[in-house]
Structure formats: structure tokens, C-alpha cells
Amino acid sequence: MSILESLELALKNIVSSKTRTVLTMLGIIIGVAAVIVIVGLGNGLEQYVTDSFSDMGTNTLTVTVMSRGSTRTLSVDEMYEIVDENSQYLDLCSPTVTMPGYVKIGSETITSTSVQGVSEDYFSISGDTVASGRGLQYSDMAARGKVCVIGAYLNLAYYGGNAVGQTLRVGGQSLTIVGVLAQTDEDLEEGGSDDCIYLPYTTASRLIGDVSSYIITMQSEDYIDESVAVLESALYEVFASDDYYTVTSMSEMLETMTSMINILVGVLAGIAAISLVVGGIGIMNIMLVSVTERTREIGIRKSLGAKERYIMQQFVIEAACTSALGGIIGILLGDGLSIAASTVVTRLMEETLTVAPTLSAVALAFGISVGIGILFGYLPAKKAAGLNPIDALHYD
């Protein structure tokens, strides 16, 4: 008996017992669909995180320094000198000062707005553009100017789109608005990225204390290790200890986040794959029942000269076909659920997140489903092939 003949006979047996076949394939269908959706969700999360970090700039380094008494401190000018001395690796530098407290516009008090003191290079580092007015300038830093640049949300919500030239108060200090940033979010909302205020870091540091954080860009992402090394070396010379500063690379943070997502997806996919094993056990069980039901058929075929390997081949192919058919249905179901999940997650998170299973994940899930059918179909097939023809013919 050829493989094609065994395949044809297997399909006839599957079709003849539709309900039993569907129930047998259920574990395979659920397992394959779950694996595809989970892997697709992992891919979507990874792409979302990558895009988010790209918006923040993967060529940036964040430096946090702490004073070590009165004899060992790092001033802003000294940090600028470190950047200039290592210009082959480092490019722009902006001190950053996060302002706590509230913002007062007219008679209204706002607590959701983020307020930061930055340098004139900050917008070049962050990629923000000024839609109206001007950005912060070096002269604002030198004179500790009482000026600021605000986000599009504040401009529209509190100034009707005409904020330039008007004032607000931060930490009790009155600031004149000299510029408005272009909108970055699709929707303008309270607490969003467009709900922000930027003032000169010199003005901010006078209000709350010394600068302790810096954002520095690299000349090239190809020299991340070298850039981090020169910064840490220069800071070590100042503090004589690595306990008083940290240098964080956005690229390293992205790699860490991506690896965490991959581990989580792997664990969840492994848990989902357990249902594939359960489905395989179901296939083995139903094939054992099938062997019992077709004992006389097996006896007749063996008495007519059918070899054991042909009997085994028939039952293994039937188990593999059942499992493969379940895998195909599971793939179609998984793709459908992935599309639905993309819509649901996007609406719930109000962020674009695409659940996109890869072709390799689909192929792997299908291959595993077929492999499980062959693996769990082997024992029933071996039992069928080993039946004594005389006993099989007398089986009632």
C-alpha cells in the first residue's frame, strides 16, 4: 500500500466520524491558536516598546550624579567639559531638572503638568519642534531667564492657542511663555506628553537646588560601549568611586525590556503548548479506540497478506492527518483572534498595538501539531500492526 493510498483511507475514516474527529482535534486547535496569539502579542509588544524607545532616542545616555561632600562635586560646566573633551563619542548635552509641585495659570492650579529645567540643546536631543514663538536660548541660561516653552495642550486648553507672550507661575516664580511646541500625541489630553513646561535649567536649579541629571547624545550608536566607558571614567576621576553616579543607555534599556518580553512570551507560549500535549493524548486515546473498532478489518487485511509496516503506516498517517487538520484550523483561528485582539487591545490601551504572529511561529506551531500526531499515533499503530490475524478475525 502506497502512502497516497494510506492518506486517502485516513481521510475517509476522518470524514466518516466528523463529531468524534472535531472533539479529538479540540486540544490541538486550542493549543495552536493560543501559541499563535501569544507569540503575536509578544511581537506586538516588542515593536511597541522599540517604537517608544526610538521616539525617546536610542542614541542618548542618561547620567545621574550625586554630590560626595563639599570637596567632590560635579558642576554643570565640568560636565560640559567632559562632553567636549570626548567629542569623538559624545555630542550634545542638556542638564535636566525636574520641578516638583504645581503650576498656576491665572486662578487655576494644575498638578498634572510635567515641568523640567533644560538647556537650549534639549529640543534637538528630544526631537521636539517649536510651532510658534521661539525655543530656549543660551542667553536664557546665562541670564537665568524667567521664560518657558509650553506644550500644545496647555496652549490650547488655557490660552486658546495664543500662549506666546503670556505668563504662568511655577513654584511661585512667574515665567513668560516664549514658545509653544508642536503637538506630538494624536489627542491632546491632561497629563499627556503635550501637557508640559520647559524652562532654563539655571532658573530651575535656582528654585530647587543643584543639577543632578544630564541627557547626553552620542555621535553614533555604534560606539555605545565606548561612550559609556569614557563617561564613567571621567566621573570616576571626580568621585573616586562608582557609587555616586550612574550612566544609563537607552539602547541597553531597550535590550533589557525586549529580553524580558521574550522571556514572558516564551513562558506563556510554553504554558499554552501544554494543551497540544493534551490534544496528543486525546488523539492517542481515540486511535486506540479506532484500533479496537477495526480489529476485524485489520485481521482481514493481514490475512490477505498486508504487512505490519503497512498497517502501522495507515494508523500513523491517520493520526498525523487528524493532528495536521487540527493545526490548520488552529492557525486560522489564531489569525482571526490576533486580528480581534489587535482591535481590542488598541481600544483599551488607546495606543496602536498590532498582534502580529510571524510566519516562523505559524510554521513551528503546525510542525509541532503534526509531530504530536505522529508521536501519539505510534503506540496505537504499533498495537494494530502487532495483532494476531486469527485472533483479530474472531474478534466480535
Image (spheres, grey):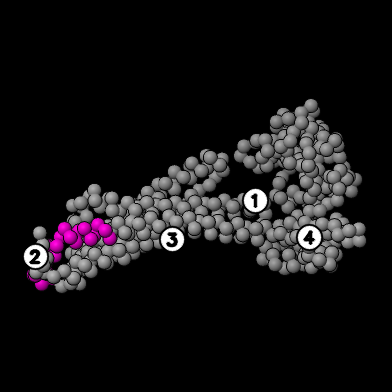
Helix, strand or loop at label 1? It is helix
Mark 4 or 3, closer to the camera: 4
Magenta-colored span: 284-306
Helix, strand or loop at label 2? It is helix
Task: Mark 4 or mark 3: name the one nearer the start of the chain.
Answer: 4
Q: Are marks 4 and 2 in contact (CB under 8 Å)?
A: no
Residue 85 in the image: above or below residue 98:
below
Task: Mark 2 or mark 1: name the one nearer the start of the chain.
Answer: 1
Residue wearing tag 1: 55
Residue wearing tag 2: 393
Which labelled disc corresponds to residue 247?
none
Q: CA distance from mark 4 to mark 2?
A: 84 Å
Q: Residue at 71% of width from left, 37% of height from top?
A: 112
Residue wearing tag 3: 360
Quadrant of res 323: bottom left
Work out whether residue 384 can be spotted.
yes
Task: Mark 1 or mark 4: name the one nearer the start of the chain.
Answer: 1
Residue wearing tag 4: 245
x and y percent of residue 345 in the render?
51, 43
State yes or no: residue 294 in magenta. yes
Q: CA distance from mark 3 to mark 1?
A: 29 Å
Q: Are marks 4 and 3 in contact (CB under 8 Å)?
A: no
Badge 3: few (under 14), some or many (20 or more) residues near its Cα, within 10 Å? few
Q: Disc 4 residue type?
A: Tyr
